[in-house]
Image: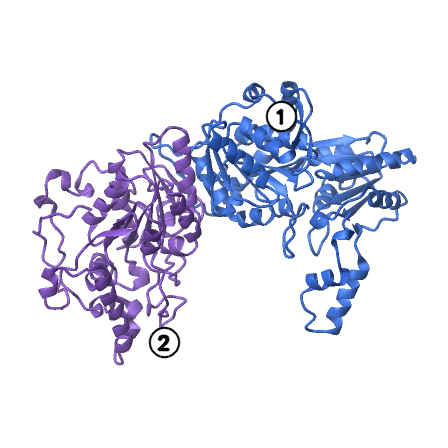
Amino acid sequence: MLRQIEGSRAVAETVALCRPEVVCAYPISPQTHIIEALGAMVKSGSLTPCEFINVESEFAAMSVSIGASAAGARAYTATASQGLLFMLEAVYNAAGLGLPIVMTLANRAIGAPINIWNDHSDAMAVRDSGWIQLFAETNQEASDLHIQAFRLAEELSVPVMVCMDGFILTHAVEGIDVPEQSVVDAFLPPYEPRQVLDPADPVSIGAMVGPEAFEEVRYLAHLRQLDALERIPSLAEAFAEAVGRPSGGLLHAYRTADAETIVVALGSVLGTIKDAVDARREAGERIGVVGITAFRPFPGDAVRAALSGARRVVVVEKAFSIGFGGVLSTDVAMATHGGPGSLRTVIAGLGGRPITRRSLEVMLVAAGQDQLPPLTFLDLDHAIVERERGRMTRTRRSGPSAENILRDLGTVASRIG
Amino acid sequence: MTTHPVRFYQVGSFAAGNRLLDDDQRSVQADPNRSNSLDSGHRACQGCGEALGARYALDAAMRATHGQLVAVNATGCLEVFSTPYPETSWRIPWLHSLFGNAPAVATGVAAAMKVKGRRDVRVVAQAGDGGTVDIGLGCLSGMFERNDDVLFICYDNEAYMNTGVQRSGATPPAARTATTEAVGPEPGNVFGQGKDLPRIAMAHDIAYVATATVADLHDLEQKVERAMELRGARYIHILVPCPLGWGSDPSATIRVARLAKETGLFPVFEAENGVVTSASPIRRRTPVEAYLSIQRRYAHLFGEHPHTEVIARLQAIADKNIETYGLLDDEAKQATPEGIDE
């Protein structure tokens, strides 16, 4: 049944249906509504048995999850941005230990400059940690992915991060269907750990591993991610059968059948991109979209197949590797090497900068005319950058750049949108 | 801790022999059926105080919980010397995650046991002084504040020994470490404000806080057993000499620990709900020189030009502890200050 609810609310209700046994919470915008809702459910008794633990940091949130998961409990937490970086050591540790923790990442920019709005810098920063990373395009998908995430994590003993765009999804109210408990119970069996701290059968977990075995342990983690590439589509099929709607999978292709140009992206911006693509289609361009749901493991074969007919690929990214360029673009380039003609990277939406349909269309027109440079920063205000560059050239003590740029801009709020 | 009227202690050590005690008061280690939680064959250095302390503490906890125990370990010597696979020394379920998160990991284990209805399974988290007073302090304070059902044990050897004897927040003034070298006009560690973790733990009003040394292992066992009688957050801080880092003879580990207590430099006490309930009295007051001079980390204080003023400042710390905790009972007050002859 569709209800008009906030994305965070839907995720919280869905996570509760997955019967987590330990939920740790440390507040960070824009993840707060999820953990607040779960806290209320535990405190009121509607989510039981479950321990809701208000921890003192994100580092503790992931650490408590590690302990709970190693002791055989289904563990969940949520974070964003600085919080993810603060728990980074434990994020790697959870994956290294093979603990099937599920975490929502309410994607948000990373400071400095401090910024609470959405981009994908946080998710990209933990790209190599060994977590499975699934990106939701809509709130319905964000909600549904959590059910699949618990099953995927536990089947493979690999932690799974469900990435949903901060504010754009977490705080958006729209029609979302949260399944019945019985549907989720039928899809998601109880957690049966592969390793557990049990006095009846003592094991040592987390021992020192030297050069004699480290590479094998790491390679095994890689193989489990490759297993996930097989498991993710089959879980999506099973989910569609159980719940009655498609959700998840490795990627979603949209109007790509005869497309010469294909736009690739992650997350909620795909909605706007599809609108822009529809407009270009009406103008006669053969253009389509590939939305990648599974970013780690990266579905290289599926991406190559989806892009095989395209002459141009434009990767729109809400993050970038400073000093190099696109992150997702690199993966797409690796997957399609020797394949389609040109690959262009468009960095957009950093720190919550709105990605408008109009800007996308202008960019796509240029792309269609093969006039897009290899690396584009969408809607970048070059004049303001040059002004600060000039200041830095003229004066040694030019001061903090972010503050200088804000001063140059004047009242910035009116410019957003 | 319940005080024991038996005074038939051995000269010098003041330790009461097991044979003089009733069966139920004999040490856990004297029991042939002890659990050997940390089994032999590990790679600790000769004379390692931490290995000794951990063995006694965990076996006592195992007896107190009827074998229903899970241990969480911070990164450090204890973790490294006990687990190079396939030679783990742990005969209890044991988890190592990271350096600074053992208290939080233990919270997670305790939460899992609670939610699964296994309240009989108890959790001990353990770390060295670096993992406790420095990098782990945030998680530890959080665990205390939430009053999670975890006994946290700090094995304090007063520096980062696993990485090669660098200074920690628990390194005492004047001590030489690899990052507080015995050079310059004020050799060794600075006289700072200290970071008194037992008192910081007490400030959280948790159910139980105790200090102990590996010189009185019976006292240590009794404190662990007392801790396991209680629920909620509990803390035991054990002084464990490190022959390598302290420059003491491996055969002198017990003696060094005993002198730390007998000088007053390391007060041995216990507290419940934030209030000190007992202190182990000094039997024979001993000047700090007796403790300092047998450790090479203090060698720069002695020799041809002894730093008498530095030694006096260290003596003042000991004197303050003696006063704060009332460490001199009537018997000791009448005894003449002197070194322990062994």
Amino acid carrying label 2: it is Glu
Name the mark on residue A120. Answer: none
Percent across and percent down for residue A390 are 77, 68
Looking at the image, is B202 positioned above or below residue A183?
A: below
Amino acid carrying label 1: it is Val
**Residue B120 in sight:** yes
Q: For this view, does A268 lie left or right of residue B62? A: right
Q: Badge 1 local density, few (<14 within 10 Å), some, or many (20+)?
A: many
Q: What residue sits right under mark 1 in the picture? A: A178
Residue, x 77% and y 33% (percent of image)? A306
Q: For this view, does B199 lie left or right of residue A184? A: left
Percent across and percent down for residue A364 are 85, 43
Picture colour for chain A: blue
Which quadrant of the figure contains the C terminus of chain B? bottom left
- Which picture quadrant has residue B213? bottom left
**Residue A160 in sight:** no
Q: Are marks 2 and 1 in contact (CB under 8 Å)?
A: no
Discs 2, 1: same chain:
no
Secondary structure of the residue carrying tag 1 is loop
Residue, x 49% and y 43% (percent of image)? A61
Picture colour for chain B: purple
